[in-house]
Image (cartoon, grey):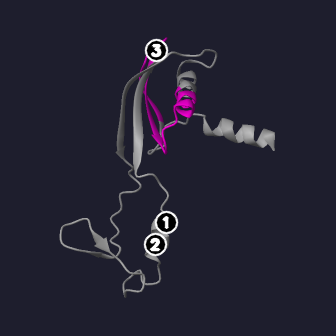
Amino acid sequence: MGVTAFVLAACQSTSKPFNGTTGFQVESQTENTATIRYTTAGKQNSVKDEHKFQAACQQTLGHNKKYSIQILSSQEIAHPNTISSDQYGRQIGNTNTKFGLSNTPDLYNSDNLGARDALNVSPSTLRVVRYICS
């Protein structure tokens, strides 16, 4: 059990190349430094983030070293997968207010709006951190 927990914890802190939503991208690189843009989802956790940033530095510049990290900027952006063009319920005018009842005759009549919303577990924002490894 302890070994499984360790393996899972190690996998969660590894950095991954950018996949269109999350991961790291190398913006510029020299022999000893790199500027990296890392996009993460979920809650901010400084310990896990430090491990991810360090792993991205090691993948970019070499695995043998612990690198100094200098944060250049951090910002939140809208998660591209949560922006939906589906219109559920009824929209009133030009507002963002929507009303929906699960028993209302509609294209999605058999769906339960509350259950659909509860199952939508993706974070609505992503955090983009730009930093320098040296």
Contact, mark 3 vs mark 2 (Cβ under 8 Å): no
Question: What residue did someone put label 2 on?
Answer: 114
Q: Secondary structure at mark 2?
A: helix
Amino acid type at mark 2? Gly
Rendered residue at 39%/50% (across/down): 79
Q: What span is in magenta? A: 24-53
Question: What residue did someone put label 3 on?
Answer: 33
Contact, mark 1 vs mark 3 (Cβ under 8 Å): no
Question: What residue did someone put label 1 on?
Answer: 118
**Of the image marks 1 and 3, the number of the one nearer the N terminus:** 3
Amino acid type at mark 1? Ala
Q: Secondary structure at mark 1?
A: helix
Is disc 2 surrounded by few (<14), some (14 to 19) or many (20+) residues within 10 Å?
Answer: few
Is disc 1 surrounded by few (<14), some (14 to 19) or many (20+) residues within 10 Å?
Answer: few
Rendered residue at 54%/27% (across/down): 50
49 is within the stretch colored magenta:
yes
Q: CA distance from mark 1 to mark 3?
A: 44 Å
Q: CA distance from mark 1 to mark 2?
A: 6 Å
Amino acid type at mark 3? Thr
